[in-house]
Image: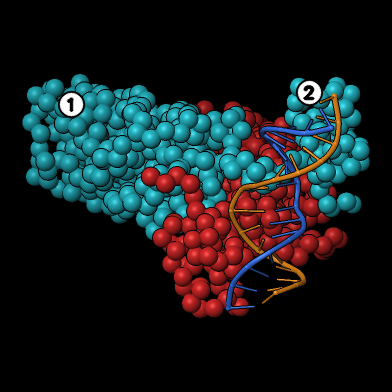
Chain colours: A red, B cyan, C orange, D blue
Amino acid sequence: MDHKRATIKDIASELKLSPSTVSKALRDHPNIGVVTKERVKKLAKQLHFVPNQSAIRFKQQKSFTLGILIPSMLDHFYVAAVEGFEKFAYDSGYNVLIGQSHESLLREKELLLTMQSNRVDGLIIAISRETVDTSHINECVQAGIPIVYFMRKPINEDFHCVCSDVYTGAIDAVAYFVSRGHKRIGFINASSFWTTSRDRFLGYRDGLVQHHIPFDKSLVQESDFTQESNLQAMRRLMQLESPPTAVLAFKDQVLLDAMCCLRREFPSKATTVELIGYGANPIIQYLEHPPLASLKEQPYEIGQKAGSLLLDLVNHPRTGYQPQLVKLPCELQVFNTHKQR
Amino acid sequence: MDHKRATIKDIASELKLSPSTVSKALRDHPNIGVVTKERVKKLAKQLHFVPNQSAIRFKQQKSFTLGILIPSMLDHFYVAAVEGFEKFAYDSGYNVLIGQSHESLLREKELLLTMQSNRVDGLIIAISRETVDTSHINECVQAGIPIVYFMRKPINEDFHCVCSDVYTGAIDAVAYFVSRGHKRIGFINASSFWTTSRDRFLGYRDGLVQHHIPFDKSLVQESDFTQESNLQAMRRLMQLESPPTAVLAFKDQVLLDAMCCLRREFPSKATTVELIGYGANPIIQYLEHPPLASLKEQPYEIGQKAGSLLLDLVNHPRTGYQPQLVKLPCELQVFNTHKQR
DNA sequence: TTGTAGGCGTTATCAA
DNA sequence: TTGATAACGCCTACAA
């Protein structure tokens, strides 16, 4: 079997044409004769010619590759975001390089170097939990790689960012809790370094204010998303002198652990404390006793939108553009209204 | 800010050295003086020099990229396999290009072309549900791209393959069912074109034989993994004149839908019919009433092993090698022994 | 120990 | 309408 892959040169010499003619013919360049085009394309097919992207990339000084940096693919949300981003990228003729930081700053730095080395034409990032200093990201920008943040964005960074409208989501969640008679509403949040945590918090607080419920600092706990941390946060809430009767969770993974905590450690309250999370994780449909509700986000669309903002930056490089903050709405999806307080 | 990225030439001219000297110095080539190396490396760091992989790939006629083709990242199993593969690849200095067929043969073909165009140095594949003809895969092989199958392998294809030892797993599952008194044991299987379905089936059948239970064809149903198909398969089983009291499912996703089917359509049996799946999906820990058990597979290790077999083929190209079939053990993980028949 | 030359596959530019 | 040439950044032989 012939293991050497056919090149443009091979086609050219076989057809007694020049490589440049073949190159143009293959790409339907207008000033190549129809007959020649036909001959070239026919032979190309015969030889199973596949253009060598390595060469094209090199020649064009472009990798036609976009990078996406996420915490982990074990998180359903980010998988969906990757899908949206990939779809957009592929449709635009780009490949995608995926990197998972696994919430490690060190890994994130390494991945960023790999991305640079691969000369990705642009990059979208959801920063790791550990990322407080962003100098490694700024280095990419200075190397000419445009960046778009999504979901997790460092506070005080002026780049495009695409995320869910978690603020309004929190307002809606609180309103729904209140409509069901709750007055003690807990909240398990995440790193205060992210805008997405701050926005959730503001929505939570403003939601309370709108319903004339006093804000109680002790009802807000922080988790780092490990199972143990989720359980601890819920435990701290339930051990308060006046524990919450409803809890808003940063995301469904936190919510699920909170439910486990209730079932195991506070069984008497497991059927009364109501929970709302973010994400509308499909797992929920398999639960016999689903939580009250979840704020359905649009990860796929967020990935697409981030891709389109990024590609715009790639194709129209500029410095000092006006950073956009795109927020896609969350929708409260109610699962369970059977519980009674 | 300087947007042109530094090249070896830049360093060379700045230091009044030749590019080749710089190239060697950067890679610690033995016959470059220590002083020169120091000077070169120092300036390289100053200029934020990052080697241009595009150029290296082109020059080396190698992409240093391995491909992995999976049905979908929404499946937890394949995400874990990707992780193992990526870990291995990165540690060996390779990038990874991920492709999702979404169970579509057309998409699989497209992805394979992309992989070829990107000149991936090798490829591991779990074929799509629709893939019955494998000529598109053979074309890759003939183009010199080594292939390793994992999990889903077409019957009658002679390449390396890494998968779970689902045969023994099925034997174990049946034995466990029998130990709990079951005699009518159903089985929901998948495409008979995959070795992994055939092996499950053989284990199921041999398991029955070992315990002198007659094989009943009507107790075996096939599903294509859509929710509707899973439900239908379970429904067909339960509507038999003599329905099963226990069911082995191709994977946990099927098992979960089967549980839903029981709860909704056969509530009287929901607490007695016992189920075992494959995968030990972490979702299960969040269920109030978990299934009886699941066969824990080793997707991460499977991804790694497939990577190492592949890299061996990449580095030692040969034709007519003896294909290996590597089977990693499944372990029966028991969740629930409370049910009584 | 350092330098020079050639080439990987493709395409843009310019010439024929 | 087609062809010749040079260039992209890096590496490998080989020469100095």
Residue under label 1, please give it: B207
Question: How many other residues sit within 10 Å of disc 1, few (<14), some (14-19) or many (≥20)?
Answer: many
Residue under label 2, please give it: B31
- Say whether residue A267 is visible: no
Based on the displayed image, in which of its 4 quarters is residue B283 positioned? top left
Residue drawn at (38%, 38%) of the image = B149
Which part of the image, by quadrant, shows the N terminus of chain A?
A: top left
- Chain letter of mark 1 equals B
In this view, the mark in front (2 or 1): 2
C14 lies left or right of A18:
right
Q: Amino acid at mark 1?
A: Gly
B259 lies left or right of C12:
left
Question: How many other residues sit within 10 Å of disc 2, few (<14), some (14-19) or many (≥20)?
Answer: few
- Chain letter of mark 2 equals B
Q: CA distance from mark 2 to mark 1?
A: 65 Å
Viewer-closest of A276 and B84: B84
Residue drawn at (61%, 50%) of the image = A54
Viewer-closest of B162 and B300: B162
Viewer-closest of B218 and A136: A136
Instruction: Point out residue B164 in the picture as x, y percentages from the top left corner.
Output: 35, 30
Q: Secondary structure at mark 2?
A: loop
Residue drawn at (78%, 36%) of the image = B20
The answer to whether marks 2 and 1 sit on the same chain is: yes
Q: Secondary structure at mark 1?
A: helix
* Above-or-below relation of A94 to B152: below
Instruction: Point out residue A171 in the picture as x, y percentages from the top left corner.
Output: 66, 56
- Say whether residue B240 is visible: yes
* Above-or-below relation of A153 to B201: below
Q: Amino acid at mark 2?
A: Asn
Based on the displayed image, in which of its 4 quarters is residue A131 positioned? top right
Disc on the earlier residue, 2 or 1: 2
